[in-house]
């Protein structure tokens, strides 16, 4: 659903603070703009003077006078050149700096947004807002104040000079300007709306391309290249349709300006000729008048041509503002304190949770305590809320009601950085950043030494396979780690957590996607990692959690069973059913007829 378009004045008000750091650059830029304007406006006065002297007393028009005027104008052109260079170089750098500042603010804001935002927003749209939308802001930030300042100067100065020549003719000419402005307003608004649709759709197109390229193996496996091309082509043609509509409004907008442009010249020719017949204006004055009207019309045309760039910039600012306005759900409270000397006791006190977009209950009145160093497993049917429960501990989400405590402190009352630095997460879907193996491991502790990195890799069982690679720790893993196997990626992610050395460990089906051999190796690494740490493990393969100190069975949004493996099997409840199910993984092989598994 497309958001309501913001008013231009509101967007400009939000954008103006970005000039604060560059106020002196902007001041000098506008001074240079004034110099170039003066240089341009002086020429008609010089020509008027020469024409007037030549028509009234040709003998007074000397070579010295002509060379003096020419020299003055030449000096003015040198000044104009220097001022233009400053505007073209330093002014553009200022625009690029503002773009950079805005992108930094947008990226910093993204880091504060919760999983809810990213679950409901396409990455392609976010990328579009961070890149192409802000590209247009560079030109806007530089040219917008400059163009309007020059237009204001030329309009005011031209009016004063022309009014002195002939007030009535000047009033007639300038009365056409507001009529032209009113006529163009509607088209200008349509162009703005069209640019907004265009920006929204390019975000969708980016998302479509990203989705297809990241899933290229699936595409090829199902021989669905034509399907993907047709989906892309449909979006691509829709983008062309939107651009065609944009250009139609722009053409109508520019054509309206050209019509009024012609009307002004008609007025100058007809009214000026009549006034000259009646000796209300001198021929030299009419020449100067025509030159100033030409300058004025050139200024108006320049503003009109800038209108497209203006609307692109405004649209970029609007989409930037929409991103910045995205609500931060998870944040540090004003009185948040550092979490120190963590022992690892986790307590859920009557915790309930539902997602804000659909309000479907996920967890209801969850209440339990995990003692420091205890190994607890969390099991239950798929979609029962196990991962959501784990996500509440590092505050990827906040409970709808109730509270989560770490060492007796409500985690909402401690800083996010100190909380998350003490919580390690190993997930089923491993994400490795594009870069080397070393860069991915050290991500767990950026200040770690080489010895610490290799020790973490050894503890994770990754060192041997890493040094066996051609480039060792400098091996490039590819985007999302595509150059490594699932087991290798998982061991690197475990090494990353070893390096972090958290007090609390969350294992979210960390071995579910691995083959038996890899699972065995990873399980050994996870056992080492869990030693001495409070560990909460989500597992579908129940054979991997026999040694857990305690098992919590989650179903129907609540914990319905609790105990160790043998106790729960004897109860013959849901845990026993899951364990005995061949679909879940191995109850038929591991349990005997009495259900004890012994």
Image: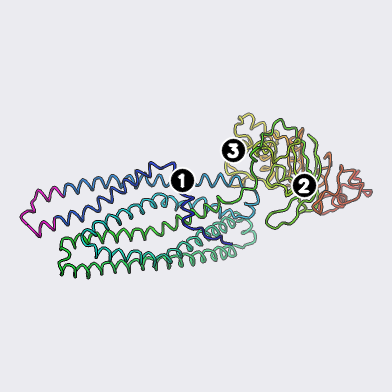
Q: Which residues are magenta?
A: 50-69
Which circle marks residue 439 in the picture?
3
Q: Secondary structure at mark 3?
A: helix
Which circle marks residue 18 in the picture?
1
Image quadrant where one finds the N terminus: bottom right
Left or right of 74 on screen, residue 382 = right
Which circle marks residue 351 in the picture?
2
Whether residue 347 is in magenta: the answer is no
In front: 247, or 67? 67
Q: Position of residue 550 (x, y in %)?
A: 84, 41
Whether residue 52 is in magenta: the answer is yes
Q: Position of residue 364 (x, y in %)?
A: 79, 51
Q: Nearer the viewer, mark 1 or mark 3?
A: 1
Left or right of 297 on screen, residue 452 = right
- Within 10 Å of disc 1 (Cα), the crowding (few <14, some 14-19, many 20+) is some
In front: 307, or 212? 307
Sequence-earlier tag: 1 or 3: 1
Q: Nearer the viewer, mark 2 or mark 3?
A: 2
């Amino acid at each position: 659903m497309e958001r309501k378009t913001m008013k231009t004045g509101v967007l400009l008000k939000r954008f103006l603070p970005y000039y604060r750091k560059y106020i002196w650059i902007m001041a000098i830029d506008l001074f240079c703009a004034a110099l170039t304007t003066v240089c341009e406006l002086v020429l008609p006065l010089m020509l008027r003077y020469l024409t007037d002297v030549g028509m009234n007393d040709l003998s007074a028009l000397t070579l010295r006078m002509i060379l003096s005027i020419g020299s003055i104008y030449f000096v003015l052109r040198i000044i104009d050149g220097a001022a233009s260079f400053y505007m073209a170089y330093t002014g553009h750098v200022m625009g690029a700096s503002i773009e950079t500042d805005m992108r930094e603010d947008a990226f910093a804001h993204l880091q504060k947004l919760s999983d809810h935002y990213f679950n409901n927003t396409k990455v392609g749209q976010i990328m579009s807002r961070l890149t192409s939308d802000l590209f247009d802001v560079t030109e806007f930030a530089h040219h917008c104040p400059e163009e309007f300042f020059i237009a204001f100067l030329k309009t005011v100065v031209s009016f004063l000079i022309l009014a002195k020549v002939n007030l009535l003719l000047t009033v007639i000419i300038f009365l056409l300007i507001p009529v032209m402005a009113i006529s163009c307003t509607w088209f200008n608004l349509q162009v703005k709306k069209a640019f907004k649709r265009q920006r929204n759709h390019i975000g969708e197109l980016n998302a479509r391309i990203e989705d297809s390229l990241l899933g290229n193996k699936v595409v090829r496996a199902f021989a669905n290249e034509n399907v993907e091309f047709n989906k892309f082509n449909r979006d691509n043609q829709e983008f062309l349709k939107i651009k065609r509509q944009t250009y139609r409004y722009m053409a109508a907008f520019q054509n309206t300006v050209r019509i009024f442009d012609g009307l002004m010249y008609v007025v100058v020719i007809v009214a000026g000729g009549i006034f000259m017949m009646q000796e209300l204006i001198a021929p030299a004055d009419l020449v100067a008048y025509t030159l100033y009207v030409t300058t004025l019309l050139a200024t108006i045309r320049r503003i009109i041509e800038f209108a497209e760039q203006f609307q692109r910039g405004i649209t970029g600012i609007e989409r930037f503002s929409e991103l910045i306005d995205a609500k931060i759900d998870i944040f540090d409270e004003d009185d948040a304190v550092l979490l120190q000397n963590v022992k690892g006791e986790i307590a859920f006190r009557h915790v309930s949770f539902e997602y804000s977009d659909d309000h479907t209950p996920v967890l209801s009145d969850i209440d339990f305590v995990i003692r420091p160093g205890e190994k607890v497993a969390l099991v239950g049917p798929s979609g029962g809320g196990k991962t959501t429960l784990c996500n509440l501990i590092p505050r990827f989400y906040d409970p709808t009601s109730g509270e989560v405590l770490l060492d007796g402190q409500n985690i909402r009352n401690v800083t996010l950085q100190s909380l998350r630095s003490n919580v390690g997460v190993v997930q089923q879907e491993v994400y490795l950043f594009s870069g080397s193996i070393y860069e991915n491991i050290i991500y767990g502790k950026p200040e770690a030494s080489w010895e610490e990195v290799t020790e973490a890799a050894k503890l994770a069982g990754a060192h041997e396979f890493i040094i066996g690679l051609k480039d060792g720790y400098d091996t490039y893993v590819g985007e999302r780690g595509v150059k490594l196997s699932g087991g290798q990626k998982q061991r690197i992610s475990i090494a990353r957590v070893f390096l972090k050395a958290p007090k609390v460990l969350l294992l979210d089906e960390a071995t579910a996607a691995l083959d038996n051999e890899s699972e065995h190796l990873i399980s050994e690494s996870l056992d080492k990692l869990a030693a001495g740490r409070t560990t909460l493990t989500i597992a579908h393969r129940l054979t991997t959690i026999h040694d857990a100190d305690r098992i919590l069975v989650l179903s129907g949004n609540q914990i319905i069973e609790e105990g160790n493996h043998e106790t729960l099997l004897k109860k013959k409840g849901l845990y026993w059913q899951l364990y005995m199910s061949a679909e879940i993984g191995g109850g038929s092989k591991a349990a005997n007829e009495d259900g004890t598994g012994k």
